[in-house]
Image: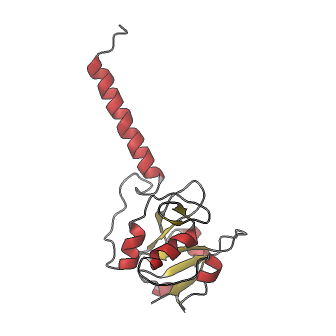
Amino acid sequence: MLGYSVRKISQVAQSLCLLALIFTVSGCGILGKSGIPKSGRIPNSPVVRTAFSVLGVPYKWGGSSPAEGFDCSGLVYWVFRQHNINIPRTSTQQIKAGKSVSRHSIQAGDIVCFDTGQSQGYHVGLATGRGSFIHSPKKGSCVQESSLRNRYWWTRLLSVRRIF
């Protein structure tokens, strides 16, 4: 024997499994950067609740369903479709959908459109109504909630679109 008890090995294995679970969950944006669940009440908006239901779904270029994954505009498109609301599929079309509202008038369910300087067009997400938005940011990430107060996002906010 190597001098390890079965009990000690079991304790180490349990600790490793717990760490792996925490790492996996936090890597997909379900937990905040501190590892603490993001707080705040989810607004009573069916569209926003639907967006929250897919937190953690992996990014997939061209994806527009939880089964295949989402790109940013695919997520926004899918969420509205769940409520029988037809909007365009691509971010370049979504930035013209609905009516424009002031960045200081953002409400839950508004589409927030960003100019990130990428050649693929614009980046879009859904405002939560609590100073954040749900989006599918990039390859290797998952659907997540990010703060609109973050300097990166606030300075790149190009348009806010209200669909209803």
Quarter location, residue 96: bottom right
Horizontal and vertical percent position of residue 5: 29, 16
Please give the count of numbered marks on the rendered protein: 0
Give the residue at x 42% y 76%: 82
- Farthest top residue? 1
Quarter location, residue 122: bottom right
Horizontal and vertical percent position of residue 54: 42, 64
Q: Is residue 99 above or below residue 87?
A: below
Please, which colouring scheme is shown?
A: secondary structure
Quarter location, residue 20: top left
- Quadrant location of the N terminus? top left
Horizontal and vertical percent position of residue 118: 70, 68
Q: Is residue 74 above or below residue 95?
A: above
Give the residue at x 41% y 80%: 83
Give the residue at x 51% y 80%: 111
Horizontal and vertical percent position of residue 113: 58, 78
- Quadrant location of the C terminus? bottom left
Give the residue at x 53% y 90%: 98
- Farthest bottom residue? 99
- Farthest right residue? 119
Position of residue 50 in the picture relative to residue 141 (left or right): left
Q: Is residue 151 above or below residue 31?
A: below
Front residue of this view, candidates 156 and 93: 93
Position of residue 142 in the picture relative to residue 43 (left or right): right
